[in-house]
Image (spheres, helix red, strand yellow):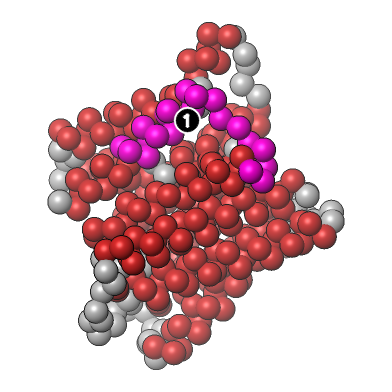
């Protein structure tokens, strides 16, 4: 969602760029694993987002001043920037709410369906309609999600879906919806802003909105402190991991050939699946693993088709 207005610099080799993006995606996945550990230790959702956005904001402020970017917003842009910040705040809250309730990999797989929603939103707002190939891939991704959610087995066994499962799934899908709208606004209303400035204002709105929501008590237990040292370490880890991944991605974007290599970032749900199994003992059955592979494959093919 960010880009840099810097002089052209030599790009990395394909192997180096892919390696960096694999590392960044894995850091983002580890951030969500740390978040789940913090939530299991009674840390509040708002507190976790404050930790994450606060550290990111400090880094972005440093980048903006280092690049000597102008902070003044062009006429007519301020309201769209505010809307984008609020959308990303809601997306963060929804995704962390999902991570707190359902397996991390499942939350990320559902959240990563935003390319489908973005394509449909762009079409609905006057853009080009999806191609037949894109429609087939979208259908394939939805079929994969059915297996990831294990709906056939649940319906056959008559097992009722628990409230945490329903809320977590709905929050993950809500995060995808909100993020797709944010991406549309970024591309069609805020493209005139330098990436550093746009990102800095976005994270600033996220931080301030979480702070206001916490002080006003809008989210029950949202500012709860962790119950033990493990929760505090997890909060520190999630903030550090996210900020490190964000900073690496932001600084090296001009050299990573994102138009070609962006689908590599879909390593995030795969890494979260492995880390969730090793650290959190979150296990998926064979049908869910197959569905996850279908979803990831469809998303990667959709991304490459869009770029071509």
Q: Which percent across, then down, holds residue 175?
A: 48, 46
Q: Which residue is mark 1?
A: 289
- For the question of whether residue 80 can be seen, the reply is no
**Magenta extent:** 278-298
Q: Residue at x 33, y 38 (%)?
A: 297
Q: Furthest-front residue in view? A: 15
Q: Which percent across, then down, holds residue 211?
A: 66, 65
Tell me the quadrant of the picture where the N terminus can be found.
bottom left
- The 10 Å Cα crowd at callout 1, few under 14, some 14 to 19, many 20 or more, is some
Q: Is residue 136 above or below residue 82?
A: above
- Nearer to the camera, 222 or 67: 67
Q: Which percent across, then down, holds residue 21?
A: 39, 61
**Location of residue 18 (image quadrant):** bottom left
Q: Is residue 42 above or below residue 15?
A: above
Q: Secondary structure at mark 1?
A: helix
Residue 280 magenta-highlighted: yes
Q: Furthest-right residue in view? A: 228
Chief secondary structure of the magenta span?
helix
Q: Is residue 2 above or below residue 8?
A: above
Q: Residue at x 70, y 61 (%)?
A: 235
The reply, left or right, for residue 103 in relation to residue 172 is right
Label tally: 1
Q: Which percent across, then down, holds residue 292?
A: 43, 34
Q: Residue at x 19, y 53 (%)?
A: 307
- For the question of whether residue 232 can be seen, the reply is yes
Residue 279 magenta-highlighted: yes
């Amino acid at each position: 969602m960010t880009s840099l207005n810097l002089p052209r610099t030599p790009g990395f080799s394909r192997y180096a760029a892919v390696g960096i993006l694999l590392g960044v995606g894995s850091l983002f996945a580890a951030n969500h694993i740390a978040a789940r550990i913090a939530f299991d230790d009674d840390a509040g959702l708002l507190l976790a987002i404050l930790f994450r956005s606060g550290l990111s904001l400090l880094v972005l402020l440093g980048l903006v001043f280092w690049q000597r970017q102008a902070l003044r917003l062009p006429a007519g842009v301020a309201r769209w920037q505010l809307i984008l910040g609020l959308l990303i705040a809601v997306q963060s809250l929804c995704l962390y709410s999902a991570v707190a309730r359902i397996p991390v990999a499942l939350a990320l797989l559902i959240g990563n369906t935003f390319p489908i929603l973005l394509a449909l939103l762009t079409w609905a707002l006057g853009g080009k309609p999806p191609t037949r190939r894109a429609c087939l891939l979208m259908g394939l991704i939805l079929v994969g999600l059915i297996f990831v959610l294990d709906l056939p087995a649940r319906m056959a066994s008559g097992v009722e879906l628990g409230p945490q499962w329903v809320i977590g799934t709905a929050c993950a899908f809500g995060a995808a919806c909100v993020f797709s709208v944010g991406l549309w606004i970024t591309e069609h209303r805020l493209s005139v802003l330098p990436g550093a400035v746009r990102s800095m204002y976005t994270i600033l709105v996220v931080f301030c909105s979480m702070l206001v929501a916490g002080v006003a008590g809008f989210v029950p237990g949202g500012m709860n402190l962790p119950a033990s040292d493990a929760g505090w370490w997890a909060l520190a880890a999630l903030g550090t991991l996210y900020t490190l991944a964000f900073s690496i991605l932001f600084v090296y974007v001009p050299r990573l050939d994102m138009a070609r290599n962006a689908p590599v970032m879909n390593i995030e749900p795969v890494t979260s699946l492995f880390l969730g199994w090793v650290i959190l003992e979150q296990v998926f059955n064979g049908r869910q693993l197959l569905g996850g592979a279908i979803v990831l494959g469809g998303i990667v093919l959709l991304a490459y088709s869009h770029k071509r």
